[in-house]
Amino acid sequence: MCSSAAVTAAKTCLSARLHPDGFAGRPVVSILLNYFKRPGVIPRIAEAMRQSCDSVQIACEISVNVDNPHEAELWASQVRAFVPGFVMPAFSANLHEARGYNRAAKLARGRYLIIWQV
């Protein structure tokens, strides 16, 4: 059985998360991507997503689980190429795809999460 203090704390936490201003200054959309060994598409992915978000004037970010740490520099170059916070990589070592998306979701700051598979 939960104490009344625990129940009150849980309600406060949930209420703050659902408050309309709880996303002020954050992206509206987080695009989740699990990436594995396709270095030739990295710059195209980031640029295409940026252009798509800009074309509809929605603040977006890419939250990507990079499941091949050997390509970390390629993703780091994308972080440097765009507005700070647009590309948010997490580097893993051979996670299963579902866990990769979960990891990307943990980094996401947007109100809406979109799972995108290349």
Image (tube, rainbow, N blue to C red):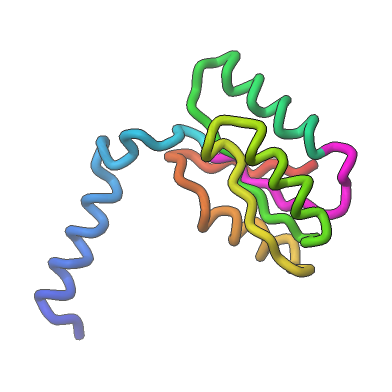
Residue 5 appears in which quarter of the rendering? Answer: bottom left
Q: Is residue 40 magenta?
A: yes
Judging depth in this view, the residue of 111 and 61 nearest the camera is 61
Q: Is residue 16 magenta?
A: no
The single residue placed furthest to the top in the displayed view is 55
Q: Taking 49 as reference, is 85 left or right?
A: left
38 w.r.t. 86: above or below: below
Q: Position of residue 101 (x, y in %)?
A: 64, 56
**Residue positioned 75% across, 67% down in the render:** 96
Q: Quadrant of the C terminus?
A: top right
**Residue positioned 66% across, 49% down in the render:** 64
Q: Position of residue 4 (x, y in %)?
A: 10, 76
Q: Quadrant of the N terminus?
A: bottom left
Q: Position of residue 94 (x, y in %)?
A: 79, 68
**Residue positioned 53% across, 43% down in the render:** 113
The single residue placed furthest to the bottom in the displayed view is 1
Magenta highlight range: 30-41
Judging depth in this view, the residue of 15 and 27 nearest the camera is 27
Q: Taking 42 as reference, is 52 left or right?
A: left
Residue 91 appears in which quarter of the rendering? Answer: bottom right
48 w.r.t. 21: above or below: above
Q: Position of residue 100 (x, y in %)?
A: 68, 60
